[in-house]
Image: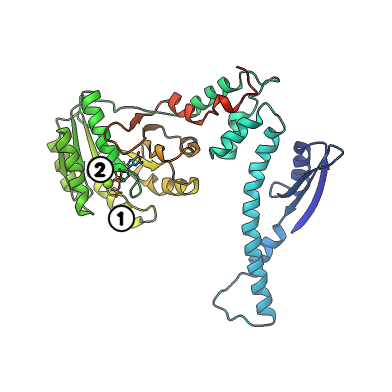
């Protein structure tokens, strides 16, 4: 690892020097404000150690003894650790780069802090804030609100067709609220939008799953069918052919469960034109959401539903997924009550959740 110190008039200049001298792979180890008003940062580049990792790969099965083998093992171990450290530092670097640019400007620093606390990814924060501040800081919040609204994509209730029922299938990991959300949607479409609704569950994996949906169906007077195979699903869709919308509940699967996910995909494939909606729980961590999305992309989801917004005050992952996937959000769920705790996603509603509360930003007298 090569470590070097840089001194410059401000952080932006220092960062530029680091990039020029050590390249884009460099990571920041520390930063200090010096008494003379300049800034000193030390940065490192770890590429020589990466090379060592290639040359001296660890083989855990080899017995550990003294001598050359032990040395190469130690080096490999060290290289692995440093590489891990490098990745962590790289993430910090991304964060600090964004922070340094914005935190040196008092009119925008509290907003940067708020958006970072909301766990919006650093590059998205940068995109939202770049060039936003006027010299006095007036009008920043309304302009941020416009940018947030533009960043979100939404699509609401189903488009009803005269050619046959629209079919939505809710897919997603276990326990995110698919069945509950499906029941909320059925009630909303039937009662508020006056649509003819049918429900089908292909979740025959758990004994209670079909019963859970049937109970909702009885209460809401919505016809509810159970299908264990692709053929049964196609038959059930036919039976509900007079509906405006058919909602299909699916079994929750872990994103790692390739085999069962493929099986579910092949069942849904029996009905052409099924629109998959991916249900993601809002409190799920960013990295996990990314992993879940990658795995459920096989269903070619048309939109995202975020559940359990009542269990968190961090909404950045919603924006992160919309920006990263380009998919719209259709609904949000905010509690366990059927059908009350369902909200149609709107740009305004989503943006409002991410805007800093005005009371925390007394610096702006807008
Ligand atoms: N707090 C909160 N709980 C919810 C919400 N939506 C669903 N739940 C609860 O989450 C739990 C799981 O809900 P289900 O609808 O059974 O979830 P699922 O995705 O169908 O689960 P599997 O079919 O087992 O994969 C239940 O206790 C629900 O009441 C919500 O918006 N907020
Ligand atoms: Mg379920």
Question: In the displayed structure, would residue 345 be above or below residue 66?
Answer: above
Residue 114, percent from left and from top: 58, 34
* Label 1: few (<14), some (14–19) or many (≥20) C-alpha neighbours in 10 Å: some
Question: Cβ–Cβ below 8 Å for labels 1 and 2?
Answer: no
Quick check: which quadrant has ligand 1?
A: top left
- Label 1 sits on residue: 260
**Quick one: 223 or 341, which is closer to the camera?**
341
> Is residue 72 left or right of 343 when viewed as pictured?
right
Residue 262, percent from left and from top: 31, 52
Q: Is mark 1 within 8 Å of ligand 1?
A: no
Q: Does the residue labelled 2 lie within 8 Å of ligand 2?
A: yes
Name the residue located 26 percent from the left edge and 28 percent from the top edge: 188
What scheme was used to colour the molecule?
rainbow
Residue 164, picture quadrant: top left
Question: In the displayed structure, would residue 193 be above or below residue 221?
Answer: above
> Is residue 361 left or right of 281 when viewed as pictured?
right
- Tell me the tag on residue 313: none
* Label 2: few (<14), some (14–19) or many (≥20) C-alpha neighbours in 10 Å: many
Disc 1 on helix, strand or loop? helix
> Is residue 139 left or right of 214 when viewed as pictured?
right
* Residue 273 makes an appearance in the image: no
- Label 2 sits on residue: 249
């Amino acid at each position: 690892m090569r470590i070097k110190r840089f001194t410059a008039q401000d952080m932006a200049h220092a960062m530029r020097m680091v990039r020029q001298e050590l390249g884009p792979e460099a990571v920041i180890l520390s930063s200090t404000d010096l008494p003379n008003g300049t800034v000193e940062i030390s940065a490192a580049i770890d590429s020589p150690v990466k090379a060592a990792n290639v040359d001296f790969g660890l083989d855990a099965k080899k017995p550990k003894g003294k001598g050359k083998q032990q040395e190469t093992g130690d080096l490999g171990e060290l290289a692995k650790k440093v590489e891990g450290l490098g990745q962590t530092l790289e993430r910090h670097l991304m964060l600090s780069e964004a922070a340094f640019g914005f935190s040196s400007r008092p009119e925008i620093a509290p907003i940067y802090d708020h958006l970072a606390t909301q766990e919006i990814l650093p590059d998205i924060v940068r995109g939202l804030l770049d060039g936003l501040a006027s010299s006095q800081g007036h009008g920043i919040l309304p302009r941020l609100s416009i940018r947030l609204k533009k960043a979100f994509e939404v699509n609401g209730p189903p488009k009803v067709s005269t050619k046959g029922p629209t079919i939505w299938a809710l897919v997603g990991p276990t326990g995110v609220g698919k069945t509950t959300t499906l029941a909320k949607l059925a009630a909303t479409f039937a009662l508020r939008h006056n649509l003819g609704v049918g429900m089908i569950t292909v979740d025959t994996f758990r004994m209670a799953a079909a019963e859970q949906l049937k109970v909702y169906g009885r209460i809401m007077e919505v016809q509810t069918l159970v299908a264990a195979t692709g053929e049964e699903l196609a038959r059930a869709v036919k039976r509900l052919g007079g509906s405006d919308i058919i909602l299909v509940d699916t079994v929750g699967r872990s994103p790692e469960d390739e085999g069962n996910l493929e099986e579910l995909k092949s069942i849904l494939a029996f009905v052409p034109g099924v629109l998959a909606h991916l249900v993601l729980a809002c409190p799920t961590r960013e990295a996990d959401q990314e992993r879940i999305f990658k795995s459920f992309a096989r269903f070619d989801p048309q939109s995202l539903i975020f559940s359990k917004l009542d269990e968190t005050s961090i909404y950045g992952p919603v924006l992160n997924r919309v920006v990263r996937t380009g998919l719209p959000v259709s609904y949000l769920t905010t509690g366990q009550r059927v059908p009350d705790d369902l909200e149609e996603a709107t740009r305004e509603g989503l943006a409002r959740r991410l805007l800093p509360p005005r009371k925390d930003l007394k610096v702006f007298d807008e």
